[in-house]
C-alpha cells in the first residue's frame, strides 16, 4: 500500500526526493547607486536596503560576494534629471561610474544593468513625453544609447524595463553595431502595471509626475498577452525574459517556462519584499522561512533565476544550514 509519509520521515529522506532546489547560482541582488562619497542611505519602505555612493557600493557588493553572491542588478539615481533622460546615457553617469568600479574590483562578478529612463526624467515616466503621452518611437534611440553606454562601462547583461514596443530590437542592434555582440539582453518582457512597485519608486525616486504607467505596462488581468510579449522579445533578440512581479504571477512564470526555450527570470519585487519585512518586524511571521518558501515557489513555477531584495539574506541562511 502506498504511504507517502515514508518519503517525509526524516530531513535526509526529504532532501533526497526534493523536486525543486534553490542554489546560490539562482539569485540576483538589486543595488541602488547614488552620487557622492561614503553614503549609505536607508530606504524607509524597504528595511535593510540602501542607496550607496560608488565607494560604499563596492563594499556592499563585496559583502554580497562573501556570502556567495555571483550577480547583481544595478540601478542609478542621478542628481540631474531632464526631459530626455540625458544622465541615463552619459559617459560619466552615476550608473556608468558604478559599473566601472564594480568590474574593476570584481571582474568576475556579473553586472546586470537596468535600462530605463524613469529615474532620469524630470517627469518620472519611462520615455520621452510628447503631448502628455509617452512617445514609443522617440524613446527607442535613447534606450539604445543607454544600453551601449552600460556595455562600454563593462556591463555583462543589460535589462530593459521600460516596456516600449520594439526596444529589444533597438538595443540588440545598437549593441551589435558597437561591437558588443557578447553583451546579453535580459528583457523585462512581462512587466505588469502592478501595485507592488510602491517601495521601489521611493528607492529609485521614480514616481511618475503625472498619470500612471498603464498605457505601457501590462494589465494584471491578462495571461495570453504575457506569452505574446515574451515571444516577441525573443524574436527581437532577448537572451532571457523576465516576469515582474513574481508571487502574484506564478502562473505566468509557469506558462512561459512551458512555451519558451530561453531562461525565465522572476523579479521578487519591492512590495513583496516589504510586506514580508513588515510582518517579520511585528513577529507575525518567521522571515527566513517565508522568504525561502517564497523563493522556492518561484523556482517551482519555472523560474531559472530570481531577482530578489532578499538574495543576500537568503544566501546567508543557506550557508548556515
Image (tube, rainbow, N blue to C red):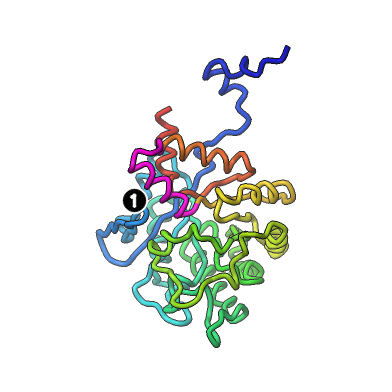
Nearest the viewer among 158 and 5 is: 5
Residue furthest bottom as drawn: 131
Above-or-below relation of 87 to 19:
below
Q: Quadrant of the C terminus?
A: top left
Q: Position of residue 244 (x, y in %)?
A: 56, 56
Residue 20 is situated, as x and y percent measured from the top left of the image, at 60, 33
| Residue annotated with mark 1 | 47
Residue 26, by quadrant, is top right
Looking at the rendered structure, the secondary structure element under dot 1 is: loop
Q: Of 158 and 207, which appears nearest the observer? A: 207
Residue 86 percent across, percent down from the top left: 45, 78
Quick check: 240 left or right of 53?
right
The location of residue 120, given as percent across then percent down, is: 43, 73
Q: Quadrant of the N terminus?
A: top right
Extreme-top residue of the structure:
1
Q: Quadrant of residue 5?
A: top right
Q: Is residue 174 visible?
A: no
Q: Nearer the viewer, residue 176 or 219?
A: 219
Q: Main secondary structure of the magenta part?
A: helix
Residue 273 located within the stretch drawn in magenta: yes
Q: Give the residue drawn at x 60%, y 44%.
A: 304
Instruction: Please count the marks in the image.
Output: 1
Q: Residue at x 48, y 48 (%)?
A: 308
| Residue at position x 51%, y 50% in the image | 268
Residue 146 shows in this picture: yes
Which stretch did the figure color magenta?
269-287
Other-residue count near label 1 (Cα within 10 Å), few / some / many at <14 / 14–19 / ≥20: few
Q: Is residue 118 above or below residue 102?
A: below
Relative to 256, is 144 above or below? below
Q: Is residue 292 left or right of residue 302?
A: left
Amino acid at each position: 500500500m502506498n504511504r507517502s509519509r515514508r518519503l517525509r520521515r526524516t530531513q535526509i529522506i526529504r532532501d533526497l526526493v526534493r523536486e525543486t532546489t534553490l542554489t546560490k547560482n539562482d539569485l540576483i541582488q538589486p543595488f541602488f547607486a547614488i552620487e557622492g562619497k561614503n553614503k549609505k542611505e536607508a530606504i524607509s519602505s524597504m528595511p535593510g536596503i540602501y542607496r550607496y555612493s560608488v565607494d560604499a557600493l563596492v563594499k556592499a557588493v563585496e559583502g554580497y560576494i562573501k556570502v556567495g553572491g555571483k550577480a547583481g542588478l544595478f540601478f542609478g539615481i542621478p542628481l540631474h534629471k531632464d526631459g530626455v533622460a540625458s544622465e541615463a546615457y552619459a559617459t560619466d553617469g552615476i550608473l556608468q561610474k558604478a559599473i566601472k568600479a564594480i568590474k574593476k574590483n570584481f571582474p568576475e562578478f556579473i553586472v546586470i544593468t537596468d535600462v530605463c529612463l524613469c529615474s532620469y526624467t524630470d517627469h518620472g515616466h519611462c520615455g520621452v513625453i510628447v503631448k502628455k503621452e509617452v512617445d514609443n518611437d522617440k524613446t527607442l534611440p535613447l534606450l539604445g544609447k543607454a544600453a551601449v553606454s552600460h556595455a562600454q562601462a563593462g556591463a555583462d547583461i543589460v535589462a530593459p524595463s521600460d516596456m516600449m514596443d520594439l526596444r529589444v530590437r533597438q538595443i540588440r542592434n545598437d549593441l551589435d553595431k558597437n561591437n558588443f555582440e557578447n553583451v546579453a539582453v535580459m528583457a523585462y518582457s512581462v512587466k505588469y502595471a502592478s501595485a507592488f512597485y510602491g517601495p521601489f519608486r521611493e528607492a529609485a525616486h521614480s514616481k511618475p509626475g503625472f498619470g500612471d504607467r498603464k498605457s505601457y505596462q501590462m494589465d494584471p488581468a491578462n495571461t495570453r498577452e504575457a506569452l505574446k510579449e515574451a515571444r516577441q522579445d525573443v524574436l527581437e533578440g532577448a537572451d532571457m525574459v523576465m516576469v515582474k512581479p513574481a508571487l502574484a504571477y506564478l502562473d505566468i512564470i509557469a506558462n512561459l517556462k512551458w512555451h519558451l526555450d530561453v531562461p525565465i527570470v522572476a523579479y521578487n519585487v519591492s512590495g513583496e519584499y516589504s510586506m514580508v519585512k513588515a510582518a517579520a518586524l511585528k513577529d507575525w511571521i518567521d522571515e527566513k522561512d517565508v522568504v525561502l518558501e517564497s523563493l522556492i515557489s518561484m523556482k517551482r513555477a519555472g523560474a531559472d533565476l530570481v531577482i530578489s531584495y532578499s538574495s543576500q539574506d537568503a544566501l546567508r541562511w543557506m550557508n548556515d544550514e
